[in-house]
Image (tube, helix red, strand yellow):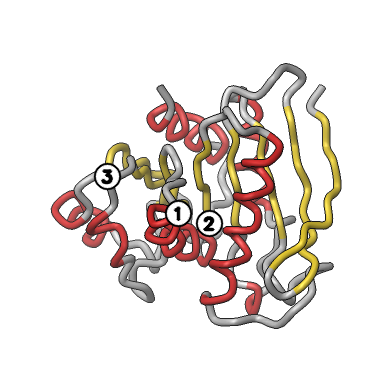
């Protein structure tokens, strides 16, 4: 059975509430899983976030879910993505401390996808880039994802067929804009909330494309 460990991590703005989900065996990889926009009800218990964390464990990895600053039991105040990028960096450091030899990927849903991609340039400066990124329902209508245009790590996308924030036309343009984009997987009949029994299998398929 997977093992769930509640954590309180030291973040740049105070304590960060987090939970680490581990498989029975030594994890083959590790992942941070970032939640949707906290000002619209997003937190680490969002169903897409928990589905993604479970998919990571089903693929043999360990998943760290956490609440951004000012959300749930995390201290601090919402910082429009700037400080949240630093929060993600603190979670990456925790995974590096616990699993120094394990490949790490970044997973983010909606606003969490924005922060996950925004963190990439700094991780590259620190010489600690992830092995890949999985962006779930990235809100392409609201953010430019500029870092994706110069990314040097594999990127996978999972999106809902009916998502107004991640339209088919935008998805079709991504291969020309994001040089390391690999799999781009659609969840049929789903909107931005990705309420579908196919979400878990689709995330597992996307993870498989990122991992050796």
Quadrant placement of the C terminus = top left
Residue at 53% in and 56% down: 109
Q: Which label sits in the foreground, 2 or 1? A: 1
Residue positioned most to the front: 126
Q: Secondary structure at mark 1?
A: loop
For this view, does 73 lie left or right of residue 112? right
Residue 201 image label: none
Residue at 83% in and 37% down: 4
Q: Secondary structure at mark 2?
A: strand
On the image, the x and y values in percent for residue 143 come to 37, 73
Res 48 seen here = no
Say which residue label 3 marks.
181
Q: Which label sits in the foreground, 1 or 3? A: 1
Question: Crowdedness of circle 2 by 10 Å Cα count: few (<14), some, many (20+)?
Answer: many
Given contact means CB atoms under 8 Å apart, are the residues at marks 3 and 2 in contact? no
Q: What count of labels does the image hold? A: 3
Q: Residue 55 occupies which quadrant of the picture?
A: top right
**Is 149 placed above or below 13 here?**
above
**Is 206 placed above or below 121 here?**
above
Q: CA distance from mark 2 to mark 1?
A: 24 Å
Task: Decide which of 123, 51 is in the foreground and name it.
Answer: 123
Task: Decide which of 204, 23 is in the foreground and name it.
Answer: 23
Residue at 67% in and 51% down: 47
Question: Crowdedness of circle 3 by 10 Å Cα count: few (<14), some, many (20+)?
Answer: many
Q: Earlier in the sequence, mark 1 or mark 3?
A: 1
Say which residue label 2 marks.
109
Q: Earlier in the sequence, mark 2 or mark 1?
A: 2
Say which residue label 1 marks.
126
Task: Decide which of 90, 73 is in the foreground and name it.
Answer: 90
Q: CA distance from mark 1 to mark 3?
A: 22 Å
Given contact means CB atoms under 8 Å apart, are the residues at marks 1 and 3 in contact? no
């Amino acid at each position: 059975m997977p093992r769930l460990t509640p954590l309180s991590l030291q973040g740049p703005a105070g304590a960060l509430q987090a939970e680490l989900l581990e498989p029975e065996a030594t994890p083959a990889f590790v992942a941070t899983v970032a939640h949707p926009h906290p000002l619209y009800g997003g937190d680490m218990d969002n169903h897409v976030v928990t589905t993604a964390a479970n998919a990571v464990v089903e693929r043999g990895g360990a998943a760290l879910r956490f609440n951004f600053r000012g959300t749930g039991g995390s201290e601090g105040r919402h910082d429009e993505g700037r400080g949240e990028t630093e929060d993600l960096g603190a979670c990456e450091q925790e995974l590096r401390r616990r699993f120094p030899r394990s490949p790490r990927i970044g997973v983010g849903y909606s606003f969490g996808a924005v922060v996950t991609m925004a963190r990439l340039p700094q991780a590259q400066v620190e010489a600690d880039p992830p092995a890949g990124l999985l962006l779930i329902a990235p809100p392409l209508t609201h953010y430019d994802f500029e870092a994706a245009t110069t990314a040097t790590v594999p990127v996978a996308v999972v999106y809902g067929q009916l998502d107004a924030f991640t339209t088919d036309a935008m998805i079709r343009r991504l291969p020309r804009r994001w040089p390391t984009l690999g799999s781009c997987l659609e969840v049929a009949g789903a909107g931005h909330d990705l309420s579908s029994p196919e979400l878990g299998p689709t995330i597992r398929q996307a993870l498989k494309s990122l991992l050796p």
